[in-house]
Image: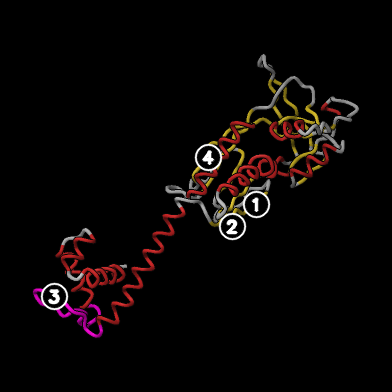
């Protein structure tokens, strides 16, 4: 790294015309610039500049070496400008993972709006009800229900929702103790829900899953087909109702489950890319308006 710094300073000396002028441009002292030049010539074992009290000229070796040093500075300037441009206009790859229900109703609409605003953005979306390893799959942002135990990830609370115990509108009974339970794989086989009424009264519901699936959509499809009952997020249920698809309805319990918190997780502990920052802000706004 010190060699690159010395080479960069050497190119600035040549272009500025003197050590003093280069020091002024680089906001360094004249002695520091001179020391870098001296160290560079000593390490190379050649003289790069023939110096007098009034001027300096490049040696033959110095001329060839300067051309390479100039290219290093040009590449560095381009890299710097490109990095700053990405913090002005989000662009390039943005990989996001989220559970199926959140991807459909929350993430995808937000990403669609961002793509219209920023055409250079190239999102990659991974829908998965299981937790995907962010580092292994180079994921920029994960939307998850519940806080993560991974201290290496930066977490931001986006909002909350409630699960609703639902069934097909064509069910012959609403007695939850007589109906098969359809579970998503993350729920496990043994199901336990604690319902709370407005007056504070609680009811514990426990059962064994009659059918499990690793897909949220399969779970919804089974409930819709009348195979049994299961939990569906309130925001997803609202979307179904808004489209007049009353095939799935909440069971008339007059009680509700506790709230679930949605978090945005990213591997960027300090300065996150602009695309990630904008996406988190848009998701938070969308969640507050529609969930």
**Within 10 angstroms of label 2, few (less than 14), some, or many (20 or more) residues?**
few
Residue 52 in the image: x percent, y percent? 10, 77
Which residue in the rendered view is the most extreme toward the left?
53
Q: Nearer the viewer, mark 4 or mark 2?
A: 4
Residue at the extreme bottom:
60
Q: CA distance from mark 4 to mark 1?
A: 20 Å
Q: Which residue is farthest top?
A: 199
Nearest to N terminus: mark 2 or mark 1 = 1
Looking at the picture, does residue 25 appear above or below residue 3?
above
Magenta region: which residues?
A: 43-61
Separation (CA) of disc 2 from disc 1 = 10 Å
The residue pinned by badge 4 equals 281
Residue in front for this viewpoint, 179 or 4: 4
Label 3: which secondary element:
loop
**Discs 2, 1 touching: Cβ within 8 Å:** yes
Q: Which residue is mark 2?
A: 137
Residue designated by label 3: 55
């Amino acid at each position: 790294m010190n060699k690159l710094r010395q080479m960069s300073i050497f190119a600035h000396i040549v272009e500025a015309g003197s050590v003093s002028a280069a020091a002024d441009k680089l906001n360094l002292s004249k002695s520091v610039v001179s020391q870098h030049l001296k160290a560079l010539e000593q390490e190379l074992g050649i003289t790069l500049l023939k110096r007098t009290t009034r001027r300096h000229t490049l040696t033959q070796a110095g001329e060839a070496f300067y051309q390479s040093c100039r290219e290093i500075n040009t590449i560095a300037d381009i890299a710097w400008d490109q990095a700053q441009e990405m913090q002005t206009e989000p662009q390039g790859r943005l990989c996001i993972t989220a559970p199926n229900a959140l991807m459909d109703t929350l993430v995808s609409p937000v990403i669609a709006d961002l793509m219209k605003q920023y055409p250079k953005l190239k999102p990659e979306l991974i829908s998965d009800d299981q937790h995907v390893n962010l580092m292994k799959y180079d994921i920029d942002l994960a939307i998850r229900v519940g806080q993560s135990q991974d201290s290496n990830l930066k977490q931001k609370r986006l909002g909350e929702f409630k699960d609703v115990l639902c069934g097909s509108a064509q069910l012959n009974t609403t007695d939850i103790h007589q109906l098969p339970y359809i579970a998503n794989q993350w729920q496990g086989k043994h199901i336990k829900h604690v319902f709370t009424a407005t007056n504070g009264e609680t009811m514990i519901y426990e059962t064994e899953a009659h059918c499990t699936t690793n897909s949220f959509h399969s779970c919804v499809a089974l409930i819709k087909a009348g195979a049994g009952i299961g939990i569906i997020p309130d925001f997803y249920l609202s979307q179904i109702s808004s489209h007049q698809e009353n095939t799935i309805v909440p069971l008339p319990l007059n009680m509700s489950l506790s709230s679930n918190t949605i978090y945005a997780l990213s591997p960027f502990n300090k300065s996150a890319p602009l695309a990630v920052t904008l996406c988190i802000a848009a998701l938070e706004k969308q969640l507050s308006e529609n969930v």
